[in-house]
Image (cartoon, rainbow, N blue to C red):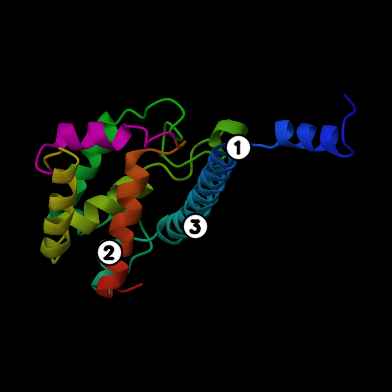
Amino acid sequence: MTNQPGHTSSTMQSQARIPMHAIHQFEQQDRQRQGVRQSFDQSQQAISRQLEFLQAQVHIWQDQCWYCTQRGLAAEHDLYQCPHGNQTAAKPWFLHVRRHIKYAPFSGCFQCGLPQMICQQWKEKSQCTYRGVMISMIAMMVHGHGTADVRQAWQQRLQGFGVDVNNQAAVTQFFGQRHGNEEMNELVQEFIWLRQRWMEAGEVE
């Protein structure tokens, strides 16, 4: 029996045709991959913005007393050297946390807690210039005079993580933990959150 013209080619085309449900599945998988890439890109952009903000803030407050700045006093010193440091609970809290904090591996500099992209102490093998900056800033922002409102908001925030703000050991341990899968610790996250909170409140710079 002689095949009619075009019969063989149409049969091959029919056999080679991809089922519609498979096409829809491929399209769905492609959309999912695009969504994952977009989510990853947005996450990386957010991290970059955080690091830029963090670097700017530690540079500003490295040798500047936040407590004295808010009161219009001479502020070219850190909390440890602050002549008014013993008037609040900030200094004892700062010294306790700095002495006992242990940072998780790959979460930041073991001396200051900053990401390695900002603190180059690990590369230069020199004295860390940012040691205590974030911890002292947090101490002043939540334990100084006039900080009750922010402290209350921060207390509620930490409760969401299962941390009692009045338990120094628990707070210190929390600070040293790695933040998710990022090369960053929770101290960095809380420092950023408190800085943004105070800037929104209209602090003195």
Residue 110: image x %, image y %? 42, 31
Decide which of 181, 3 is in the foreground and name it. Answer: 3
Q: Is residue 167 magenta?
A: yes
Q: Is residue 1 left or right of residue 93?
A: right
Residue under the point 48% across and 39% down:
128
User: Label 2 amino acid?
Assistant: Arg
Rendering coords of residue 147 (x, y %): 15, 63
Amino acid carrying mark 3 in the image? Arg
Q: Which residue is mark 2?
A: 197
Instruction: Compare marks 1 and 2 and give the one earlier in the sequence.
Output: 1
Marks 1/2: CA distance?
55 Å
Marker disc for residue 19: 1
Instruction: State which region is magenta.
Output: 165-181
Q: Tell me if I can see residue 81 in this picture.
A: no
**Image-based side of 174 in relation to 134, left or right:** left
The relative height of residue 133 versus residue 18 in the rendered view (above or below) is: below
- Badge 1 amino acid: Pro
